[in-house]
Image: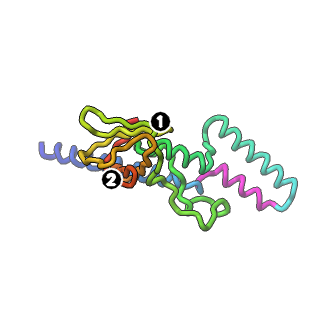
Amino acid sequence: MKSFLSKKMGMFLCLSMAITLLPAKAAKNQNSFKDSVLFDKLLACRSLNDDISRLHCFDENIKALDDANTHHDILVVDREAIVARQKQSFGFAPPVLALPKKENAYSHSIKKDQAADDVIHEITDKASFVSQDSEGHWIIGFSNGARWRQIDDQTVPNEPHVGSVVRLRKAALGSFVANIDKQSAIKMRRIQ
């Protein structure tokens, strides 16, 4: 019986480690565009000296990229679209689509003065909807459809109203806090 339990425990530990390591590997692959074979082949065409060979190489590899795009094997998204999506989904986990780390992107496509991390850590917006639930917690809505609910019992001295400036930011352990019209922070959770 002891041997059976130790085997079960060993299998459980191995499975736990595998599950723990999978997200890290997935995140690493998600942020590394250097593994894009199609894109690498396209960039390699620039090194060909013969004009006809270079044109043929570009045509062939553009067709391969177009086919991959048509079959949904690749996704081409610009940085602005990702930032817009992150702002829209701020408060939900996991992130809808993370930006690649700039140091992993191709060097010809980055500006040296840009920040290395474009992940949204806070947003500031004006409230377009304000109410209180039966427990007295504030519910604040924004023009993009997002709704946030207060989850602590802090009082807000100057009650929020439509037009209040709300600064929402990430806090410890996946939580969020909001400053309403520059008052003390209250804990919030996105509900819609």
The reply to whether dot 1 and dot 2 touch (C-beta < 8 Å) is no
- The percent coordinates of residue 131 (x first, y second) are 35, 35
Q: Residue at x 38, y 55 (%)?
A: 182
Q: Quadrant of the C terminus?
A: top left
Q: Residues within 10 Å of mark 1 (few under 14, many from 20)?
A: few
Give 150 or 66, whichever is nearer the viewer.
150
- Secondary structure under tag 2 reads loop
- Give the farthest residue toward the left: 1
- Give the farthest residue toward the front: 158
> What residue is disc 2 on?
185
Label number found at residue 15:
none
* Residue type (three-letter) at the residue carrying disc 2: Ala
Give 172 or 15, whichever is nearer the viewer.
172
Q: Residue at x 41, y 53 (%)?
A: 24
The colouring scheme, among rainbow, by chain, secondary structure or one colour, is: rainbow
The image shows residue 53, relative to residue 115, as above or below, that is: above
> What residue is disc 1 on?
145
The image shows residue 134, relative to residue 53, as above or below, that is: above
Q: Residue at x 44, y 53 (%)?
A: 122
**Residue 37 is one of the magenta-drawn residues:** yes
- Secondary structure under tag 1 reads loop
Q: Quadrant of the N terminus?
A: top left
**Residue 6 is one of the magenta-drawn residues:** no
- The percent coordinates of residue 60 (x first, y second) are 77, 46
Region rendered in magenta: 35-48
- Answer left or right for 143 relative to 161: right
* Residue type (three-letter) at the residue carrying disc 1: Gly
- The percent coordinates of residue 163 (x first, y second) are 46, 43
Question: Which one is earlier in the sequence, the residue at label 1 or at label 2?
Answer: 1
Q: CA distance from mark 1 to mark 2?
A: 22 Å
- The percent coordinates of residue 186 (x first, y second) are 31, 49
